[in-house]
Image (cartoon, grey):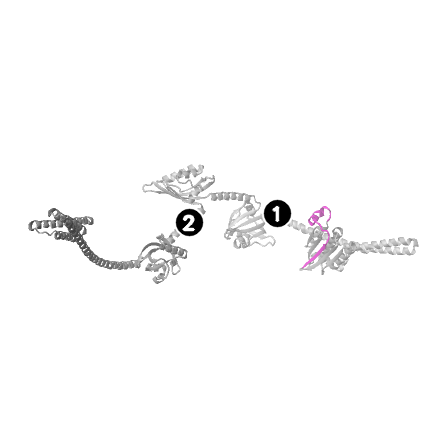
Amino acid sequence: MLILNPLEASERSVLVGYAVAVLTVAAAFAALLLMQTRWQASAPVSLLLAAVIVTTWLAGTKPGALATALAILAFTYYYVGLTGLSGNAPIQAIRLLSFTTLACYVVWITATERGAAESLRRAHDGLQRTNEALRLENMERRRTEEQLRLSEAKFRALTESASAAIFIRHGDRISYANPAASAITGYSFEELRAMSFSDTGHPDFQNLLRARALARQKGELVPVRYELKIVTKAGEERWLGFTEGVFEFEGTPAVVSIAFDITERQRAEEALRKSERLLREAEELGHTGSWEHDLVSGRIVNTPENHRLFFGDDDSKGARLEDYVDAVHPDDRAYLTARREKLLAEGGPRDIEFRVIWPDGSVHVLFGLATIVRDRSGQPVRAYGTNIDITERKRAEEAVRDSRQLLDLVLATLPVGVAVTDRAGDIVLANEASKRIWGKAMIVSGRERWAQSIGFWHDTGERIAPTEWASVRALSGGQTSLNELMDIDTYNGERKTIQNSTAPIRNVEGQIVGAVIVNQDVTERTRAEEALHESANRLQHLSRRLLAVQEEERRHLSRELHDEFGQLLASITLHLHAARRVAGEAAHAALDECMALLHHAGEQVRTLALELRPRMLETAGLDATLRWLAEQHQQRTGITTEVVGELNDVPSERSIACFRVAQEALTNVARHARAQRVWIELDQSDGRLGLTIRDDGVGFDVARAFEQAGSRGNLGLSGMRERVEILGGNLEVDSGAGRGTRIRISLPNAPLVSDSAERAA
């Protein structure tokens, strides 16, 4: 079947119309000629007009116009050429004009009617087509609605059975959420529909979700895949991975979001990242690096720390095996290469220690451990391992060796015995001096040593029990003992006196892990000290005896001066008085002068006797004697002397000592102090006797005065101190230029044996 396109069909229809015009006019003209020749009839107008009408009706306006033109030509030819009517030109012109007008009117009328019919036909055809289209549209709409219903049913079945959360939202408002979304978020469908999509997100993500929803409404591009942290209704934080798209839902554009719960994956990834971070930090802290070498391709993979172990901060090296070989110290390079070749060929030790030189010239010591992976044929295909920087450890080991050598040297040099025990008390270190003290066959076991060691407390002579040894107390209670003096029987059978100090050894946690014992053989020193102490006691006794004898001599001399010499002066005075009575007037003046001199001499003798040994010290006591001494000092020197406080009964020896100190102090004030006032302060409490003499004089350098006392033959201050110390007391001197002098003595107030003996005598 021949099918023409619309253009070809239109052209063909036009040609057919023109053919119809030609044929109809030709047929009308032929009929006109036949009627003229056969029947002598004339009807040109009717036939030709009929041809125009038929052509216009059948073929249309344009063929009708062609038929009109052909009919006019035929009409003209017929009336002018055939019938010879050309002589009536005006009439023929009117005929022609009338025919033409009539033909054109017929064409117009015909065309108008035909156009109206054609329009009506087209309108009818259009209405039919519209009805058909509506029918088809209704059928399509019903088919589409059915497909939509089926699609929605399938969609709901799919979404409600899906394990992924599905959200459909318009803008930021949730329009649909499947059961998986409710299960993940913890909210029901009704609760989700009342929420904004951004409200489901973690507070850190809510602003981002709102901004993306606004950007999508503005037609901007937003990510279609992203990860989001949400907060469930129970307050749990979970991670979701979203994939989004846009489609029409309920007649309007909507966004569908499909989300999978990736919380466990996130946790696993976070744990992996944390592990990798911890591994990197551990490598950095431990100066440990990892490496892998593909022996087939030559590719080398390093951790950053391993790269740093070989090249420091130089990032330009490390891609080639030669870089690592060049970094090795020249003295270790051949050894390292040989070990590597042996490991590749036949295995062997996997660990090796070597040195590398960094670009800055610093030398580092590395310890490496390597593993070789072989294929089925036994050929090495891959090597991997770790390296650790042991430079500091090597330095520490060298420092420990040096320290140990120094410790051994110090222990060997020390003249005292040093021993170290562990927590159980066993001796783990002892120097030669310690072995010399206890004997060469020194017991080192703690329990046996404490049980078999024989020692006595030096001051009491009591034997030291096994639990009383200083090392036991240090290990059990953390007690530190200093300079304990004890007598021991060594393992060689000798008796020695040692001075023991022991302290616990604690670790960084404060736990006791041992003890250190220091023993010093003080046998000879103790003997010397005891001899010295005995000599000091004898010297002190002798000094006290000397002072007692001196005081006795002073008392005797005072008595002799007061009694014998005083009586002699009194007799001489009586004789002078007798002589004066019998002598003449001229001798009276001389005799009076002699008696005055004798009186003055008597006063001097009495004063000297009192200074040597005032009798009132024995009769009135120390308190009254000191007040008398102050009064005498004030009268003799003019310096105001005041006594503050009071004393009760004071033993004789202490009374004499206090009197002599006060007497010497007042003498020094009169000679050197240039003082205006002197205070004598007395106090007696808590079994002690106190005496203070202070002045407002010029003062002096106390230390220098004590230094120069012996060299200058001035034993005043030294004599005071010695007199007081013999009695178990102490003397303090405080003075300085321009601030006067303060001398204080403190004595025990209990009577001594000598006092009792003196009273008995």
What label does residue 482 carry, if any?
none
Q: Amino acid at mark 2?
A: Arg
Q: Residue furthest left?
A: 38
Which circle's residue, 1 or 2, is located before the other in the chain?
2
Q: Residue furthest bottom?
A: 190
- Residue 703 magenta: yes
Q: CA distance from mark 1 to mark 2?
A: 68 Å
| Viewer-nearest residue: 325 or 194 | 194
| Viewer-nearest residue: 629 or 40 | 40
Q: Quadrant of the C terminus?
A: bottom right
- Residue 223 magenta: no
The structure residue drawn at horizontal position 61% and vertical position 47%, both measured from the top left corner, is 524
Write down the residue under mark 1: 524
Residue 175 location, x and y as percent?
Answer: 33, 60
Give yes or no for contact between labels 1 and 2 (Cβ–Cβ under 8 Å).
Answer: no
| Viewer-nearest residue: 597 or 495 | 597
| Viewer-nearest residue: 50 or 119 | 50
Quarter location, residue 684: bottom right
Residue 695 location, x and y as percent?
Answer: 72, 54
User: In the structure shown, which secondary structural element does the residue marked by tag 2 occupy?
Assistant: helix
Residue 337 appears anywhere in the view: yes
Write down the residue under mark 2: 277
Question: Which residue range is magenta in the image?
Answer: 687-714
Tell whether 139 sits left or right of 210. Answer: left
Residue 331 location, x and y as percent?
Answer: 45, 37
Residue 722 location, x and y as percent?
Answer: 70, 51
Label 2, residues with CA under 10 Å away: few <14, some 14-19, many ≥20:
few
Tell whether 197 sits left or right of 396. Answer: left
User: In the structure shown, which secondary structural element does the residue marked by tag 1 occupy?
Assistant: helix
Tell whether 462 sits left or right of 191. Answer: right
Q: Amino acid at mark 1?
A: Glu
